Image (tube, helix red, strand yellow):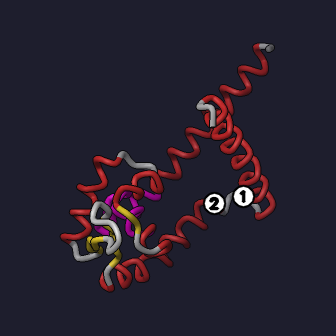
Amino acid sequence: MGSEKIDQSLKLFIVLSRAYRAINENVNKLIQTYGLNPTEFAVLELLYHKGDQPLQQIGGKILLASGSITYVVDKLEQKGFLKRVACPNDRRVTFAQITEEGKAFIEDIFPDHEKHIHSLMSELTEKEKDTAIELLKKLGLSISNEKKTEAGE
């Protein structure tokens, strides 16, 4: 493997990391103006768009360590945006459920959030966005497939 190929891979990693960090920091500042931290927003948005979720599975869906989920759910519950609901079939499982107040809150802020993200992405044309989506999916899937192969799945 030539050093030029390695250098190009490292450069891609750095550019991708910096772009992600710049976008994420910008979006997180907006989220904080809503009175939420990014994790609280992610949990609320997940419940709004995907419905009730078992507490044990939320961390994996928003890429958060499971220990932090209890804390985040507690905070959202205190704000009245979600409630815990026991699973009728399995007492070991508790669901997080968005409340009417939580739905109203998300419906109020989400259009602004979408427009903000759209504005951040407006540097790229529609075709460039499609290409970026396709390439990043290809990269991400190849890495997850590699992990599955290593794990013997």
Q: What distance separates the C-alpha of mark 2 from that of mark 1?
A: 6 Å
- Residue 142 showing in the rendered view: yes
Q: Residue at x 66, y 26 (%)?
A: 10
Rendering quarter of residue 133: bottom right
The residue range painted magenta reads: 25-45
Where does the N terminus fall, quadrant-wise?
Answer: top right
Counting other residues with Cα less than 10 Å from the Cα at mark 2, is it few (<14), some (14-19), or many (20 or more)?
A: few
Residue 6 % position (x, y): 72, 20
Helix, strand, or loop for circle 1? loop
Residue 144's place in the image compared with 102, above or below, is above
Main secondary structure found in the magenta portion: helix
**Which label was assigned to residue 124?**
1
**Going by the image, does 121 lie left or right of 28?**
right
Residue 146's place in the image compared with 62, above or below, is above
**Going by the image, does 16 lie left or right of 7?**
left
Q: Residue at x 68, y 39 (%)?
A: 145
Residue 137's place in the image compared with 72, above or below, is above
Type of the residue with mark 1: Leu
**Which label was assigned to residue 121?**
2
Helix, strand, or loop for circle 2? helix
Residue 54 % position (x, y): 38, 63
Residue 52 % position (x, y): 40, 72
